[in-house]
Amino acid sequence: MLKPTFAISAALRRAAVPDFDRYPFSLPAVQHLDVLTFHPNVTFIVGENGSGKSTLLEALAVALGYNAEGGGRNFNFGTRASHSVLHEYLRISRGYRRPRDGYFLRAESFFNLATNLDEMGPGALNSYGGTSLHEQSHGESFMALLTHRFGGNGLYILDEPEAALSPQRQLAALARIHQLVRAGSQFIIATHSPILTAYPDARIYACLPDGLRRTDYTDTEPYQVMHDFLQDPQRALEALLGEED
């Protein structure tokens, strides 16, 4: 069921951009960006490495008030100022409702977030299941975040959440995302996972050389690559490795 959305759209203030030949404005996902409209439930951004999807998601999170290295709105740690200035050039259109919860999950800096939680003391870990995230496997700590920390009526921005998850755990994450959607939450996710992007009725954008384009699930590169490989792994391997022979 569709519901009032927390984040409606993000627009690039193109007239204010100093130079589209400079990073981050030179990235395909940014260079051609006009307005990116989000689904009230789940929006996916897929694309090859270097296409700009993670940079765009990071800028979106910072523009919405989240820490660049991840966490909820009360996180302000920083191990290295590596985020771009893109958030300064985004105009966010918000719904009339304010989320009761929110979180930015950034896979590449999750270790730093876990360290910050330990430094905050045992009380900070209660909403993560009570166990230090460093005392769990990478995948277990991700699932602890999804299971214990995320609640209903939240806006959750996830950058490659599948990075630490086995296929079975990705299915479990998909089920948890569905529970949270039914509890009034909205997700914006950058991913390479053909499992996660299978979520029903999600809006999917593909980062292409000429910018972001709406696409269907079966037309995404993650789906097509995995589908073609699993259809005939031996043939795929012969085509891939045979040239060296």
Image: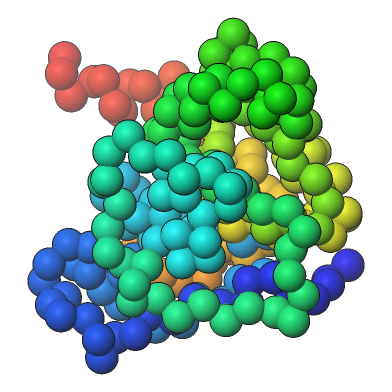
Q: Residue 181 location in percent, x, y?
A: 81, 54
Instruction: Give the quarter of the figure containing the N terminus.
Output: bottom right
Could you tell me which residue is drawn at 30 percent across and 52 percent down?
83
Residue 84 picture location, percent across and down: 27, 58
Placement of 29 over or under 44, stated as above or below: below
The residue positioned 25% from the left and 91% from the top of the image is 15
Q: Residue at x 42, y 55 (%)?
A: 58
Q: Residue furthest top?
A: 135
Of 242 and 127, which appears nearest the observer?
A: 127
Instruction: State the residue at coordinates (69%, 14%).
Output: 131
Quarter of the picture holding the C terminus: top left
**Residue 57 vs residue 155: left or right?**
left
Residue 73, given in percent of the width and then of the height, sits at: 58, 52
Residue 41 against residue 108 in the figure, above or below: below
Identify whether 87 is placed above or below 10.
above
Is residue 229 something one can see in this rendering? no
Please give left or right for residue 80 compared with residue 191 in the image: left
Would residue 242 be visible to someone looking at this image?
A: yes
